[in-house]
Amino acid sequence: MFGLLKKFKSGFARTTQSLFGAVGGIFGAKKLDAATLDTLEEALYGADFGVETTEEIMDEIQAAFKNDKELRGLDAAEIGAQVLLRVLDGAEGKFESREADPEVILLLGVNGSGKTTTTAKLGHLYEGDGRSVLLAACDTFRAAANEQIKSWSERLNIDLIASKLGADAAAVAFDAYQAAESRQHDLIIIDTAGRLHNKPHLMGELEKIVRVLKKKDESAPHHRWLVVDGSLGSNSIEQARSFHKAINLTGLVITKLDGTSRGGALVGIYRELKIPIYFVGLGEQPDDLQPFTIENYVSALFGLRQEVTE
């Protein structure tokens, strides 16, 4: 448990520093004053927690400060943590296996969100949990995507179905399903081409992949996860909103959080859409894709030494 918390703290270090470094270690023994409260409010907005969440945090801290002028940074951290625990209630995605053999995870999102890398890392994680995984390279528009996922599959020793550049992505998905059946894989993870949510022909191709999968299993794809670049901040909310409307997302994977100071963006996405968050990307190594836990996330952001509980 504590090792995982350490990984979260390392991954969210830039966000934590942006939030509290500017106020001289506010979340410590230092007493609060009006100036540090103003600075904290600006930092919360800068981290993309959103207006509603920032106001909730600040209202509760200011109310506590009004009643106790001896309030210190650590007290404010605890208050902020409790607010986020309430806001994120229900946000943890729990992977519950379906009565499907094989089970299918479909990953989608815009170019640059990290879908291909996430596909491989998910395969690595689930194989470590004892699943038999097959990767499907359905991003047939970018030569780099095919090469990237082939490199990952070889590095991690995970089975892969791929085709040539420009091949029909739906046909690759169909072939992958048949291969998983014959090779007795119990999980398929499908990487798709990056697409803008406002391009009808690209969304149509995604719908074709879904239709083809349903010919094999009416309930497939069993999981439809949007991979979102967390460094985009509030812009990621619009992406999630549009994809959810188009394909009824069942989950989110938030990537690249280790390289950004906008680690609060996932709060805004969940607050608006209530789509569960399954994984967060906290680094470049295979093991840096970690299951999202509210307690570790909140503790890491507010610099707390252990998991927080309600």
Image: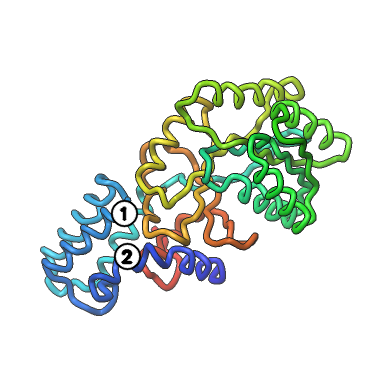
| Image location (x, y in percent) of residue 163 | 77, 36
- The Cα–Cα distance between marks 1 and 2, rounded to whole angstroms, is 19 Å
Q: How many marks?
A: 2
| Image location (x, y in percent) of residue 241 | 42, 33
Which quarter of the picture shows residue 182? top right
Instruction: Look at the image and name its color scheme.
Output: rainbow
Mark 2 surroundings within 10 Å by alpha-carbon count, few (fewer than 14), some (14 through 19), many (20 or more): some
In this rendering, position of residue 69 left or right of residue 296: left
Going from the N terminus, do you reach mark 1 or mark 2 first? 2
Residue 57, label in figure: none
Quadrant containing the N terminus is bottom right
What element does badge 2 sit on? helix
Residue at x 42% of width, y 61% of height = 309
The three-letter amino acid code for the residue at tag 1 is Val
Q: Is residue 244 above or below residue 143?
A: above
Residue 83, label in figure: 1
Mark 1 surroundings within 10 Å by alpha-carbon count, few (fewer than 14), some (14 through 19), many (20 or more): some
Q: Which residue is identified by label 2?
A: 18
**Mark in front: 1 vs 2:** 2
Q: Is residue 289 above or below residue 275?
A: below
